[in-house]
Amino acid sequence: MSQAETGRSKLSVRLGKWINVFGPLAGLLFVYGLFAIIGPSSFSAPGNLETMARQTAITGTAALGMTLVIIMGGIDLSVGSIIALSTVIIAAALQAGVSPLLAAFAGIAAGGLAGLLNGLLITRLKVMPFIVTLGTLLVVRGAAKGFAREQKIDAPLSWLNDLLATLTREQGWRILPAGVWIMVVLALGVWVLLRYTRIGRHIFAIGSNESTARLCGVAVERVKVIVYTLCAAFAGLAGLMQFSRLTVGDPTVAIGQELDVIASVVIGGGSLSGGEGSVLGTLVGALIMTVIRSGCSQMGLPNWVQEIVTGSIIVIAVTLDRLRRRTTA
């Protein structure tokens, strides 16, 4: 390869990295600016901005765990069902007189156990993650409905209900509800895990080339089990956020939420082929999804328009990822 070709290759790789980092952010600014111009003035009001932040906390929290899975080259379709199961477990625990902290832990632990099941089935049975998690999507949803006897579970009020509650005037110094700050802290934790820990390097290695990672001594099966467990635990945390908004345990909530979670990662620059993804991109992707929904709602557009727009953005994001990979190959 000549020096000129080598220089062009390095330039294309560098350009691809810049696009991967700043492309989603530019997309967010564009979408927000578009709705701010063509939408009603209420779209840019502080109250609506807070509402969008609260809505993003649920999808964004689950998407942080999905980021790990997608970077590793996997997929998890069961996160929506895990969110529902978590709300049911939390509400049932509170109804039984358990302390709010233990109830929250129970909901998150239930999610983690579902993720552990996913990881063990994928690694032990050698079945594709898509098939396994498609099956556990139904299994976990059925378990949530059975546990709740196919009805909502009312729970006594507690401080859990305040995690994503609208801030009062006296609470204005917080800027955002506690649940949003929890998502930010979790995002920092995932960023540190990916950038500075051994398991983070192993996650990228498996996503880039699983066979090479295995030859280099990476315990691929163990990492996969850990990552799927973490992903489901994050979904359990998202279920805690969902419970805070609903104040009840609902086994039918978050149907289709897994698509929003996956889309957030993909729109944010994550590659379904594995080996690429970022925490910042994921949060930006989740914000883009929320802005589209809020903008369409504020303009009084029907749900089918929102679905068409969101689906188009997902297709464009995946297409751009393919083109970028072909360019840098």
Image (tube, helix red, strand yellow):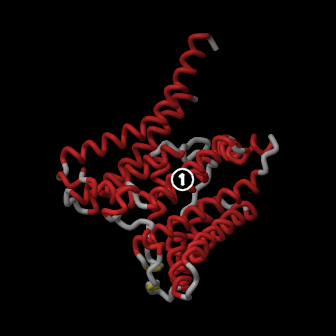
| Residue 66 in the figure: left or right of residue 157 | right
Residue 314 screen position, x and y as percent: 41, 49
Q: Say if 267 sits above or below 151 in the image.
A: above
Kindly identify the amino acid type of the residue bearing the numbered disc 1: Val
State which quarter of the image contains the N terminus.
Answer: top right
* Quadrant hosting residue 209: top right
> 18 or 259: nearer the eye?
18
Residue 142 image offset from top left, x and y in percent:
54, 80
Front in this rendered view, residue 166 or 79: 166
Residue pointed to by mark 1: 185
Question: In the rendered image of this protein, does residue 63 appear above or below residue 325?
Answer: below
Q: Position of residue 106 (x, y in %)?
A: 61, 75
Question: Nearest the camera: 138 or 41?
Answer: 41
Extreme front residue here? 170
Quick check: can you spot residue 60?
A: yes
Task: Please identify the quarter of the rendering in which residue 110 is found.
Answer: bottom right
Q: Residue shown at 46%/32% (left/top)?
A: 19
Judge from the rendering whether residue 102 lies leftward or rightward of residue 284; answer left or right.
Answer: right
* Residue at the (33%, 52%) spot, across then down: 291
Q: Secondary structure at mark 1?
A: helix
Residue 16, above or below 233: above
The quarter of the rendered structure image containing the C terminus is top right
> In the rendered image of this protein, does residue 64 appear above or below residue 248?
above
Residue drawn at x 38%, y 67% is: 165
